[in-house]
Image (cartoon, rainbow, N blue to C red):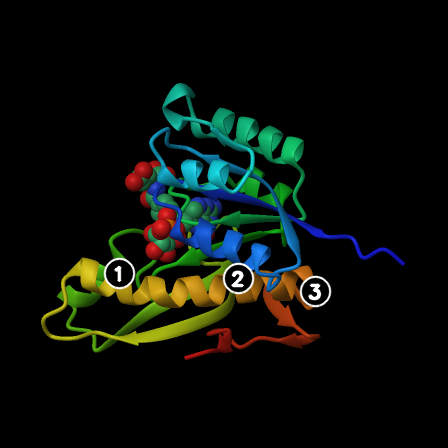
């Protein structure tokens, strides 16, 4: 019996280190999936180069070329469907998606967010953690819902915050964890172990707690 390979379409906006971790996991046989395509909303995203070097089709849908969010999301949905996707993977994708777009991919849309949700939804999370004098920070992988960074958490990983940390020091520490946990979550999805039901993340038929699967 042939085992169908899970199709991933990855959305980026920048450097693409999470994309690279996913590419590396596929190539190393740690993630049984095919990356069908990479889409960036920014033309200068280095992640587009990473995809092409890996032989993966990569396109830029520049959001500046669209009149409004709805028309952009329509084009984005068409491109994703052209590539094919069992899972749409936001990997540093910096556009807020319309409810209509999100609802058309319910349960098939995941995001990696650089904070311990529900703390610090939105942008500039590392600076905010430092400004607040937090002693720990981290990263969350969650299903995407219309509520910005409010979807059910799948996994979180914590890192310490040191007195002398700059936002980039903290980002580097967080991104080490990102590169570790995102391929892990996608391997769960590809194995059919992970789903979203009743707005909850479910792993191996067990509802995950609000902070997801503990993985410090
Ligand atoms: N409907 C949803 N859309 C998106 C979600 C989500 O959970 N629900 N997650 C974000 C990812 N994200 C943080 O993890 C995030 C991305 C972008 C923004 C934002 O404010 N974007 C601005 C533009 C900012 C820029 O270009 O630098 C905007 O879209 O106007 C906040 C959080 C992805 N989308
Ligand atoms: N709100 C979304 C957000 O800030 N996402 C963050 O952008 C970075 C992208 O890095 P990458 O392009 O090297 O993967 C990652 O740290 C990711 O958590």
Marks 3 and 1 sit apart, C-alpha to C-alpha, by: 30 Å
Residue extending furthest right? 1
The answer to whether residue 30 of the structure is visible from this angle is yes
The disc, 2 or 3, on the residue closer to the chain's N-terminal end is 2
Cβ–Cβ under 8 Å for marks 3 and 1: no
Residue labelled with disc 2: 183
Q: Residues within 10 Å of mark 3 (few under 14, many from 20)?
A: some
Q: Secondary structure at mark 1?
A: helix
State left or right for residue 174 relative to residue 54: left
Marks 2 and 3 sit apart, C-alpha to C-alpha, by: 12 Å
Rendered location of residue 197, percent (x, y): 66, 63
Which corner quadrant holds the C terminus?
bottom left
Residue labelled with disc 3: 191
Cβ–Cβ under 8 Å for marks 1 and 2: no
Q: Splitting the image into 4 quarters, where does residue 103 fall? A: top right
Q: Can you tell me whether the CB of the residue at mark 1 lies under 8 Å from the nearest atom of ligand 2?
A: yes
The disc, 3 or 1, on the residue closer to the chain's N-terminal end is 1
State left or right for residue 156 relative to residue 100: left
Rendered location of residue 135, percent (x, y): 21, 78
Residue labelled with disc 1: 171
């Amino acid at each position: 019996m042939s085992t169908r390979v899970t199709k991933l379409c990855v959305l980026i906006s920048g450097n693409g280190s999470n994309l690279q971790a996913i590419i590396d996991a596929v190539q190393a046989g740690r993630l049984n999936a095919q990356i069908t395509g990479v889409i960036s909303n920014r033309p200068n995203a280095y992640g587009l180069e990473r995809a092409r070097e890996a032989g993966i089709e990569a396109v830029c849908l520049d959001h500046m070329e669209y009149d409004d969010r709805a028309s952009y999301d329509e084009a984005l949905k068409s491109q994703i469907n052209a590539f094919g996707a069992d899972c749409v993977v936001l990997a540093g994708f910096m556009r807020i998606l319309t409810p209509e777009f999100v609802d058309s991919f319910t349960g098939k849309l995941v995001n990696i967010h650089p904070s311990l949700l529900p703390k610090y939804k939105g942008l500039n999370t590392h600076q905010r953690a430092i400004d607040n004098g937090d002693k720990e920070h981290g990263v969350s992988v969650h299903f995407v819902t219309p509520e910005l960074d409010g979807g059910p958490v799948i996994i979180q990983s914590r890192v310490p915050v040191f007195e002398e940390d700059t936002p980039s020091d903290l980002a580097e520490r967080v991104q080490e964890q990102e590169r570790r946990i995102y391929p892990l979550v996608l391997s769960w999805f590809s194995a059919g172990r992970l789903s979203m039901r009743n707005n909850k993340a479910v792993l191996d038929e067990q509802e995950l707690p609000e902070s997801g699967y503990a993985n410090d």
